[in-house]
Amino acid sequence: MERTKYRLDDTICPVARTAEIISGKWTLLIIRDLATGVKRFNQLERSLCGISPKTLSERLRSLEEEGIILRRTFAEVPPRVEYSLTEKGQDLVAVIEYMRSYGKKWLC
């Protein structure tokens, strides 16, 4: 993924960089759902009404590359894959909780 450079006093702006990572459609909702615990692909797909399997796979791969989620594969038949938040991902849960509070106060 090509990263946009947002500069603030010759450094990358942390707000812009964070927004770049989490601004994709479905990304925050995937993190929200993983905040409640380990999930399998089908569980995430069912909880995110309207997301295509291709889009979910792309978002999960991107979040894994960013170190936000952990993908764990089990050597079983049929294969089992589970997704969970890393420490980096857990730190984003507070952002989502604040967004929920903001939305309840100002948008609903």
Image (tube, rainbow, N blue to C red):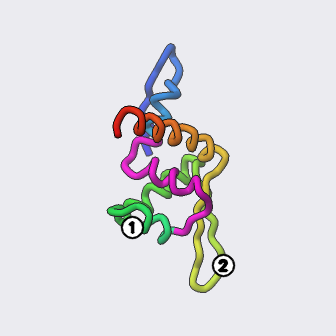
Extreme top residue here? Answer: 9
Q: Which three-letter amino acid code belongs to the residue tagged 2?
A: Ala
* Residue 27 highlighted magenta (yes or no): yes
Q: What residue type is labelled 1?
A: Pro
Task: Report the side of 95 relative to 27 (left or right).
Answer: right
Does the stretch in magenta take in 84? no
Q: Which mark is residue 61?
A: none
Report the front residue among 4 and 80: 80
The dot on residue 53 is 1
Residue 72, horizontal then vertical, whole percent? 63, 65
Q: Residues within 10 Å of mark 1 (few under 14, many from 20)?
A: few
Instruction: Give whichever of discs 2 and 1 has the lower sequence position.
Output: 1
Above or below, 78 relative to 49: below
Cβ atoms at labels 2 and 1 below 8 Å apart: no
Q: Name the residue under label 2.
A: 75
Q: In which quarter of the image is the C terminus?
A: top left
Q: What stretch is highlighted in magenta?
A: 21-40
| Residue drawn 47% across the image and 71% down it | 42
| Residue 38 in picture, x, y percent from top left | 61, 63
Q: Which of 34 and 2 is in front in this view?
A: 34
Could you tell me residue 67's position as x and y percent? 60, 48
CA separation in Å, label 2 and label 1: 22 Å
Determine the residue positioned at 37% across, 49% down.
25
Residue at image x 40%, y 61%?
48
The image shows residue 43 at horizontal and vertical percentages of 49, 69
* Vertical comparison of 45 with 79: above or below: above
Query: Helix, strand or loop at disc 2?
Result: loop
Label 1: element kind? helix
**In the displayed structure, does residue 77 sit left or right of residue 1?**
right
Q: Eyeballing the image, is 93 above or below 80?
A: above
Tell me the mark number nearer the camera, choosing from 2 and 1: 1
Instruction: Give the crowd class for mark 2: few <14, some 14-19, many >=20 residues within 10 Å.
Output: few
